Every structure is written in structure tokens, then in C-alpha cells.
């Protein structure tokens, strides 16, 4: 699982570099930083780092909470995939909330599973929308 997480984080970094729009690039950069913090927090037993990473992921994910906004930032030939991006954003929002609740309950394995679900939502959306 760690290897997959590292590969996905690397892929997110690459995707940030290829983003064409400043708003999209900023959003992806914020989410990538948040995901990195969460992963480092789990690896170093640092709950505060996980929490700060979760806040960043939420902040970066806000851009994708509205179909009309998402459509503006999708490439012309991918605008029909707006539902994929919207569903991924909803899944990310839910999974981050689950992560945070599990942290409060000190259910760290469940929190780590929620992090993994966030990562999967990111990768799924990128694979479909960006044709990986």
C-alpha cells in the first residue's frame, strides 16, 4: 500500500506541473501538499500533521464542489466528464471527514484507510479525466 501511495503522490505532483490554469494548479498544489502532510503524519505518528494536511485537502477540493466551476477547468474534450470530477470531489470531501472523525476517536487504522480512499478518488479521477 505504501508503494502505491508513493506512486500516486508522485503522479499527483506530475499532474500539478502539467496543470494549465493558475486556479487549477493552485488547487491541485494545495491538495498535493495536504496529501503529503497526511502521509508524513501517518509515517511519523504525528496527528497534528495529519490534521493540517486534511484541512489543506479540504481547501484544495473546494474548487471541485460545483459542476459549473469544474466544467470551466476541464479540457474542452473532457467537459462531458464533469460528473466524474464532481463525484471524486464529493468522495474526497466525505473521506476527509471520515479521516478526521477517526482521528478524534484514535482509530488510526480507519483514518489511514480513509486517507487511502482519498488517494484512490484522486487517482480514479485523474485516470479518467486525464486519460492515464
Image (cartoon, helix red, strand yellow):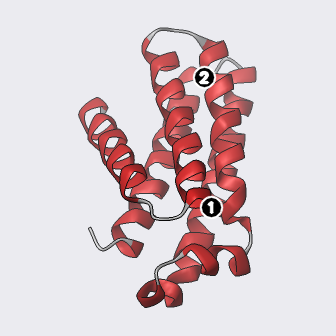
Q: For the residue labelled by badge 1, is the local secondary structure a helix, a strand or a loop?
A: helix
Q: Residue at x 69, y 60 (%)?
A: 63
The answer to whether the residue labelled 2 contacts the one labelled 1, judged by CB atoms less than 8 Å apart, is no
Label 2 to label 1: alpha-carbon separation: 19 Å
| Quadrant of the image occupied by residue 85 | bottom right
Residue 40 appears left or right of 94: left
Quadrant of the snapshot with the C terminus: bottom left
Image quarter (top left, top right, bottom left or bottom right) of the N terminus? top left
Work out whether 104 lies above or below 33: above
Quarter-of-image position of residue 53: top right
For residue 103, above or below residue 127: above
Could you tell me how many numbered marks the image carries? 2
On screen, residue 129 versus residue 8, left or right, reads: right
Residue highlighted by disc 1 = 89
- Residue 60: mark: none
The residue that appears at 62% across and 71% down in the rendered structure is 86
Disc on the earlier residue, 2 or 1? 2
Give the x, y percent position of residue 50.
Answer: 60, 23
Residue 71 location (% of width, % of height) = 61, 81
Q: Residues within 10 Å of mark 1 (few under 14, many from 20)?
A: many
Q: Nearer the viewer, residue 120 or 106?
A: 120
Q: Is residue 107 above or below residue 88?
A: above
Residue at which label 2 appears: 50
Q: Residue at x 75, y 22 (%)?
A: 104
Residue at 49% x, 40% y is 32
Amino acid at each position: 500500500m505504501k508503494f502505491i501511495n508513493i506512486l500516486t503522490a508522485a503522479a499527483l505532483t506530475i499532474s500539478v506541473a502539467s496543470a494549465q490554469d493558475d486556479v487549477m494548479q493552485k488547487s491541485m498544489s494545495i491538495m498535493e501538499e495536504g496529501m503529503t502532510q497526511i502521509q508524513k503524519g501517518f509515517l511519523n505518528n504525528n496527528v497534528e500533521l495529519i490534521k493540517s494536511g486534511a484541512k489543506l485537502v479540504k481547501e484544495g477540493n473546494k474548487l471541485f464542489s460545483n459542476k459549473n466551476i469544474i466544467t470551466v477547468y476541464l479540457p474542452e474534450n473532457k467537459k462531458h466528464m464533469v460528473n466524474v470530477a464532481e463525484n471524486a470531489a464529493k468522495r474526497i470531501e466525505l473521506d476527509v471527514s471520515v479521516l478526521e472523525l477517526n482521528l478524534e476517536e484514535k482509530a488510526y487504522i480507519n483514518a489511514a484507510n480513509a486517507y487511502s480512499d482519498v488517494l484512490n478518488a484522486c487517482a480514479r479521477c485523474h485516470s479518467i479525466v486525464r486519460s492515464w
